[in-house]
Amino acid sequence: MKHQEIEALLEDFKVEEFTHGNCQAAAVTHRGAVREHNEDAFVVLPEQRVWAVADGMGGHEAGDVASKLLTGMIGNCLPGL
């Protein structure tokens, strides 16, 4: 596989890295075989020891809305605990 082909494949992935104290985490999601865009979402709250991934459920309508709504709710509710 050529370098350009590898770069093209990696464009379909959503990658985030997080560091908090001695803890390191990474989240990697992919659009899958059904959708043209990535419907997955994730939230990381290391202070609360929470890492969550919401799968956009390829093949279902508005999966991106549902996954972002869920991770947004987690992100808004847990920091105060």
Image (tube, grey):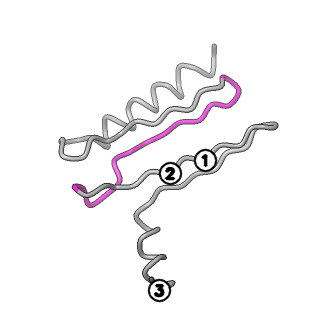
22 left or right, relative to 77: right
What whole-number distance in Å separates the C-alpha atoms at marks 2 and 3?
A: 22 Å
Residue at point 38% right, 32% down?
Answer: 69
- Residue 64 x/y as whole percent: 32, 43
Residue type at tag 3: Lys
Which residue in the protein does label 3 denote? 2
Categorize mark 2 by other alpha carbons within 10 Å: few (<14), some (14-19), many (20+): few
- Asked if the stretch drawn in magenta spans residue 42, the answer is yes
Residue at point 46% right, 68% down?
Answer: 10
Categorize mark 1 by other alpha carbons within 10 Å: few (<14), some (14-19), many (20+): few
Q: Looking at the image, is 56 positioned above or below residue 16?
A: above
Answer with mark 3 or mark 1, whichever residue precedes in sequence: 3
- Which residues are drawn in magenta? 34-48
Residue at point 46% right, 32% down?
Answer: 72
The numbered disc on residue 26 is 1
Q: Looking at the image, is 71 positioned above or below residue 27?
A: above
Which of the pair 44/29 is nearer the observer?
A: 29
Which residue in the protein does label 2 denote? 28
C-beta proximity under 8 Å, tags 1 and 2: yes
Answer with mark 2 or mark 3, whichever residue precedes in sequence: 3
Which of the pair 70/2 is nearer the observer?
A: 2
Quick one: which residue is furthest to the right in this view? 21
Residue type at tag 1: Ala
- Residue 78 x/y as whole percent: 57, 20
Q: Quadrant of residue 62?
A: top left
Categorize mark 3 by other alpha carbons within 10 Å: few (<14), some (14-19), many (20+): few
- Asked if the stretch drawn in magenta spans residue 39, the answer is yes
The quadrant the C terminus occupies is: top right
